[in-house]
Image (cartoon, helix red, strand yellow):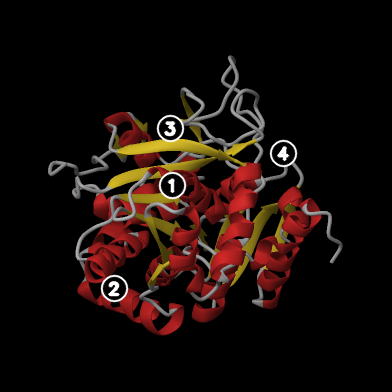
Amino acid sequence: MENYHYPDDQGFFGQHGGLFVSETLMAALAELKKVYYEAKADPAFWAQFQYDLKHYVGRPSPVYHAKRLSDHLGGAQIYLKREDLNHTGAHKVNNTIGQALLAQRMGKKRVIAETGAGQHGVASATVAARFGMACTVFMGTEDIKRQAPNVYRMKLLGAEVVGVESGSKTLKDAMNEALREWVARVDDTYYIIGTVAGPMPYPEMVRDFQCVIGEEARMQMQEAIGRQPDVAVACVGGGSNAIGLFHPYIDVPETRLVGVEAGGLGLNGQQHAAPISSGSQLGVLHGFRGYLMQDDHGQVLATHSVSAGLDYPGVGPEHGLLHDLGRVQYEAIGDEAALEAFHLLCLQEGIIPALESSHAVAWAVANAPKMAKNETILVNLSGRGDKDINTVARLDGVSL
């Protein structure tokens, strides 16, 4: 796909994306777009970004051959892109470093963020401390209960955590509140969106910061196996870890790309968070147009996933386009399979994955046995599972 150049000047990825916000935010977003494009053309900005990724985050994250897991499954060789080894424990910090540098460039002294699983909240609080900024994180009260360790981590890092009681009390509602806060304090506040959703220029900007994942993986897989993987797979909520892996592979035709949505309790009902896999129609949410779980009247449906970070009714606009073009295949993995993959990776490799990442691992577990032993699956292990121990223990009937 040599002619793949998105978004367009209006922030659209095909029919997805754009800018659907109140007048109050138009000037702020126009300023952000201008500042980002200036920074994008400034070698000094990228030098600082790369310096912090290396010396603060600990990049490059390694690619690891999960040989025992591969042998256990008896098919394709599974490699893991170890984003779980980053400072703060996930891919989120790649983006928050970049956006904090932009906030600094714009003279903002305060940042706000939304979070579901808490990893983006922790990463935002971390970079706020790193750059000397005040930080407020909005989090649904349901997620606060299931992600208590991350809530405490944010507070240790100096952030204020605001519980959101509206709606389903999860990620969608936290993002609603963060947008409302930004409208009220747009002059002194920078909003660090955590995924490749939201209004222009966020989907492009977050993608650009996360592309370090796929760029490293291309070099590392060439070194490890002398070619690129047959399949590259990542979990998809809003979709930043996945687009970070996929975007650098779009022009690598020999590598099949698979995005794994949260199948929850099954696609037959509404207890899932899989807008593409369930055949959702286009809708507008959080300032962009994309595939959105909604009823016949256009009202956003409640979602469910065992993983708080995938519990989102929409999907980033670039994922919508890649689905439309057929370049990425999107499938759903349910709660039960994700939990089984979580335990299997623990026992076979001594790695405790995030429940979000466990969805991608589960896809590999299901599909590796169908492939030849000389074929390769690269799984983006987007985060580690420390934050999910309480959830898994509760589901296993264990009292901590």
Disc with the residue nearer the chain's start (2 vs 1): 2
At 49% across and 79% down in the image, what residue appears?
131
Label 3 belongs to which residue?
290
- Residue 30 is at least partly visible in this image: no
Tell which of 263 and 284 is nearer to you.
Answer: 263
How far is mark 2 from mark 4, CA to CA? 39 Å
Q: SS class of the residue under badge 4?
A: loop
Element on which disc 1 rests: helix
- Label 2, label 1: how many angstroms apart (C-alpha)? 45 Å
Instruction: Give SS at disc 2.
Output: helix
Return the residue at label 2: 45
Would you name the residue on which mark 1 appears?
369
- Identity of the amino acid at label 4? Ser
Residue 168 tag number: 4
> Which residue is at the far right?
399
Marks 1 and 3, how far apart at CA: 34 Å
Three-letter amino acid code of the residue under disc 3: Gly
Tell me which amino acid carries mark 2. Answer: Phe
Q: CA distance from mark 3 to mark 4?
A: 20 Å
Task: Count residues near mark 3 (Cα–Cα under 10 Å), then give few for <14, some for 14-19, many for 20+.
Answer: many
Percent position of residue 41, x then y = 20, 65
Where 338 falls versus 320 (above or below)? below
In the rendered image, residue 45, in percent from the top left (x then y), is placed at 29, 73
Tell whether 215 sits left or right of 117. left
Q: Quadrant of residue 321?
A: top left
Name which residue lies at 51% across and 66% down. 90
Q: Quadrant of residue 400?
A: bottom right
Cβ–Cβ below 8 Å for labels 2 and 4? no
Q: Residue at x 51, y 40 (%)?
A: 261
Mark 4: few, some, or many residues within 10 Å (few <14, many ≥20)? Answer: some
